[in-house]
Amino acid sequence: MHFRGSKIILFLGYLFLYLPLICIVVYSFNESRLLATWTRFSFKWYGTLLSNPIILRATWTSIKVACLSATVSVVLGTMSAIIITRFTKFRWKPLFIGAITAPLVMPEVVMGLSLLMLFVGLERVFGWSTGSGTTPIIIAHITLTLSYVTMLVHARLHDLDRSIEEAALDLGASPLKAFFVITLPMISPAIVLGWLLAFALSLDDVVIASFVSGAGSTTLPMVVFSSLRFGISPEINALATILMTLLSIGVIILAVLFYKKKI
Amino acid sequence: MTNPMYRAEEKVISWLVGIAKKISGHNLLIAIPFTWIFLFFICPCLILIEISLSESLIASPPYTSMVEWLSGHMLQIRMNLGNYLVLFTDEMYIRGFITSVFIAGMSTACCLLIGFPMAYAIARTPERLRNIFLMLVVLPFWTSFLIRVYAWIMLLSPGGFINSLLMKYNIIETPLQLMNNSFAACIGIIYAYLPFMIFPLYNAIEKIDYALIEAAYDLGCSPMKAFFSIVVPLSAPGIFAGSALVFVPAIGEFVIPELLGGAQTLTIGRLVWNEFFGNMSWPTAASLSIVLLIFVVFPIVLVQGHRETKFLSRN
């Protein structure tokens, strides 16, 4: 049953969501630096972007950080989800759940600040220096994304039919084997989604990375953020268009895979 | 003759075996994520509290330590509440809190005004189309956050899209000041967090039995009245959840007010950043963070959590 104007509302709503992004894509192909004049179609800004060593290095750093933190986060998140769903006798569970979900509501500035203070403290007390490497960013991103992964995997584990797992245990499989052979394949869609979400969150974060990163390591969002402070730049248009294209391809592949129930 | 060394070794070995037995499966599984969360979430929070109670120093690190050993055997604990006192007396911080609450509140209200009709319209489309419409809502959310903020810089800045267009057709002569005010910060937040509002609203509205509304119509209820007396109360859990999901990240937001809000839109997030990076005043930054958590974030989370459990137990 339609109510009057529902199509207009949807049209306006999606216009609001997509028009700004379409503007970016269109103007990434404008040769002029100014928005007022459309000179001609060109790939000029893509060229300058791809020959910018700072952006290339930062992209590589970001991808490395995102891959590593997403992987660790998925492992720890799956463990935490198992603890939350399956360990009924665990005494510290409320504290555990609270601490693991707290980063979801923690303002980024507070989280960045507190982690940096921890790293400074560690260096002062134990002499353990994180140096200028990417280690602090990776640790911070794991802590940030852990809660999201845990929630995703927990939701899946919660809905799972436990009897299959119990049957395996009754037939003499060790708990470890039952997990890897029965449970893991069944929760793998949630794990894949969790990895992708953690990857995207890590690739997106600018505040926490700015706080904890040393002088030598700059991630892509940090570079973009500092250039945005100076206003419009056609190179960022080109970068955004590339990112959006990659994203759309990724989403289409995922949608097709999920549709065909491959994962 | 027993060798004392041998005895000691035996003791160590049996002790290690005892530990190894305790570190079987379950405990190890609990220990790994627990250690991580303890080290990198709980410890940083405790350190933050400690630093918020210390005094600012011009040194490295720039704060006094709370616990100190005096002449080797006397423990001295110093707590300084001065940082908190400043926050509640200095006008800049008070105004920062008001600005943050105002911007977050406005954005939440606008998100609700835009999100509710959209969620309602999506819930009323044919079932096979709903997932596509919902996916179209999340899709921009997966593009980089900074890019979504940048899109609005491009639209609103003095040399941006809207001003260029208006000037080209001679509607205005000088660029309008659309950016660098709290209005722009609100738009940025609405754009960035709208999906957080639409999803819980959609989940609540989808469950409403349409027959109820039809019954109201049949009994002579006007559409407006039917909407406010049936749809709104039944979607209340979605309204509250969505509002919390927008308000909580909006209140501590740093990037959007920094890029779109201009110099005078000083939110708490920006104040924390400025105290830390600009003034090198770690204790002030820490106490600002603690106040933000205790007075703003915790109450909302607690109320929302309470509402959710109450709602779940009622159904």
Image: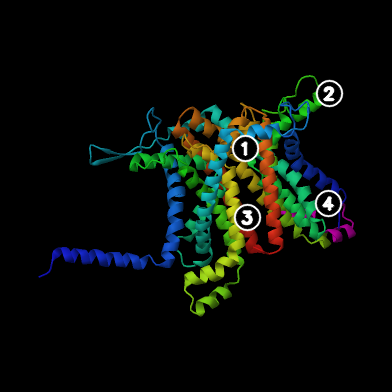
Respond whether the residues carrying marks 4 and 3 are from the same subunit: yes
Packing grade of label 4 (10 A; few <14, some 14-19, many >=20) is few
- Write the residue at 53% across / 48% down: A144
Nearer the N terminus, badge 3 or badge 1?
1
Counting residues from the start of the chain, the first of labels 1 and 2 encountered is 1
Residue under pointer 4: B225
Q: CA distance from mark 4 to mark 1?
A: 32 Å
Any mark on residue B227, and which? none
Dot 4 and dot 3 residues touching (CB under 8 Å): no
Residue carrying label 3? B307
The residue under the point 88% across, 57% down is: B217
Q: Which numbered circle lies on residue B171?
A: 2
Specify whether A169 is left or right of B2: right
Q: Position of residue A58 (x, y in %)?
A: 55, 38
Whether residues under marks 4 and 2 lie with C-beta atoms below 8 angstroms apart, the answer is no
Magenta residues span: B213-236
